[in-house]
Image: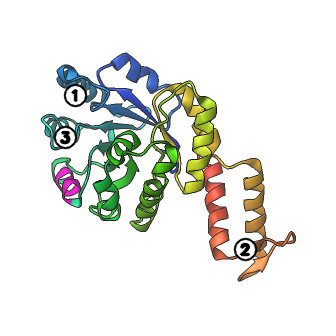
């Protein structure tokens, strides 16, 4: 996996032909969904099909969103898929406490874990969850469920939980979380605007539910030419002088600005 995955494409686990297309879509990570995208009578089929897929490592990193651990299928998903050689990560829905992360880690045979926070309680526990276990590699919001739980209308009602999760991830030493999905797969202008807002809040990359969304997400999150030029200017100045200083145009730089510039160039070179 690239050090800076920007696109996480969700696909239904009971549709192997769709999964096969997703693996050639250009997504940084393909997320096979055994939870929301799969009807109850197809859970066993989706699990078995996904296990077959992961008998050998696919060309693209594959994560699996298992069913909620408190339900009838989550434990079966962990038992069947955690040992799979081709598995890159398990995405755990409906996590509300560190204890649930520990339970999953015990059952998941050393697999990398990613917690999805989908309720008000989960947001309140975000930092504790983020630091719960060394096998936890990231956290993210499940915004549809969270919006229903909070009863908020409109997008702005989620900005505080979004910031809370971004801060919790970074405070726990985890990568910046990716944004939740943009549900209207044809509204690419809306997706681009939403990505710009998410980037301003500190997110890095985004989950997608259709391949047409991938290019929009990547374009929104990759540094612009102007950002790359500024980063190069900062690092050039920092290489010749020590300590805080001002660029010729008056912009102040210090160690934090240099670190941000280094990250910008690393992201620009991520492939």
* Tag 2 secondary structure: strand
Whichever of callouts 2 and 1 sits on the residue coming sooner in the sequence is: 1
Whole-percent x, y for residue 24 in the image: 49, 25
Q: Give the labeled residue for mark 3.
A: 78
Q: Which residues are magenta?
A: 99-105
Question: What secondary structure is marked by label 3?
Answer: helix
Residue shown at the point (41%, 63%) measured from the top left? 168
| Residue shown at the point (65%, 49%) measured from the top left | 268
Percent across and percent down for residue 120 are 32, 53
Question: Which residue is identified by label 1?
Answer: 47
- Asked if residue 120 lies in the magenta stretch, the reply is no
| Distance from Cα at disc 2 to Cα at disc 1 | 52 Å
Q: CA distance from mark 3 to mark 2?
A: 48 Å
Q: Is residue 5 visible?
A: no
Label 2 Cα crowd, 10 Å radius (few <14 / some 14-19 / many 20+): some
Q: Is residue 190 left or right of residue 108?
A: right
Residue 100 part of the magenta-drawn span: yes
Which disc, if any, is residue 178?
none
Q: Is residue 18 left or right of residue 71?
A: right
């Amino acid at each position: 996996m690239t050090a800076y995955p920007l696109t996480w494409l969700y696909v239904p686990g009971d549709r192997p032909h769709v999964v096969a297309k997703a693996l050639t879509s250009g997504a940084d990570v393909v997320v096979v969904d055994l939870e929301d995208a799969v009807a109850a009578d197809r859970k066993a089929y989706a699990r078995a099909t996904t296990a077959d897929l992961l008998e050998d490592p696919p060309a693209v990193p594959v994560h699996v969103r298992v069913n909620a651990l408190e339900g009838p299928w989550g434990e079966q998903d962990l038992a069947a898929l955690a040992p799979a050689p081709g598995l890159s990560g398990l995405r755990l829905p409906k996590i509300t406490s560190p204890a649930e992360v520990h339970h999953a880690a015990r059952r998941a045979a050393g697999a990398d874990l990613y917690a999805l926070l989908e309720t008000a309680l989960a947001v309140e526990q975000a930092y504790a969850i983020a630091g719960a276990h060394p096998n936890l590699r990231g956290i993210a919001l499940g915004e549809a469920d969270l919006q229903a739980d909070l009863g908020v209308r409109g997008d702005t009602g989620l900005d505080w939980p979004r910031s809370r999760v971004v801060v919790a991830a970074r405070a726990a030493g985890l990568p910046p979380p990716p944004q939740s999905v943009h549900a209207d797969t044809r509204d690419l202008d809306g997706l681009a605007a939403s990505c710009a807002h998410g980037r301003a809040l500190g997110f890095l990359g985004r989950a997608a539910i259709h391949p047409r969304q991938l290019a929009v997400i990547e374009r929104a999150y990759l540094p612009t030419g102007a950002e790359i030029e500024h980063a190069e200017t900062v690092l050039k100045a920092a290489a010749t002088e020590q300590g805080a200083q001002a660029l010729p145009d008056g912009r102040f730089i210090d160690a934090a600005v240099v670190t941000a510039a280094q990250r910008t160039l690393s992201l620009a070179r991520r492939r």
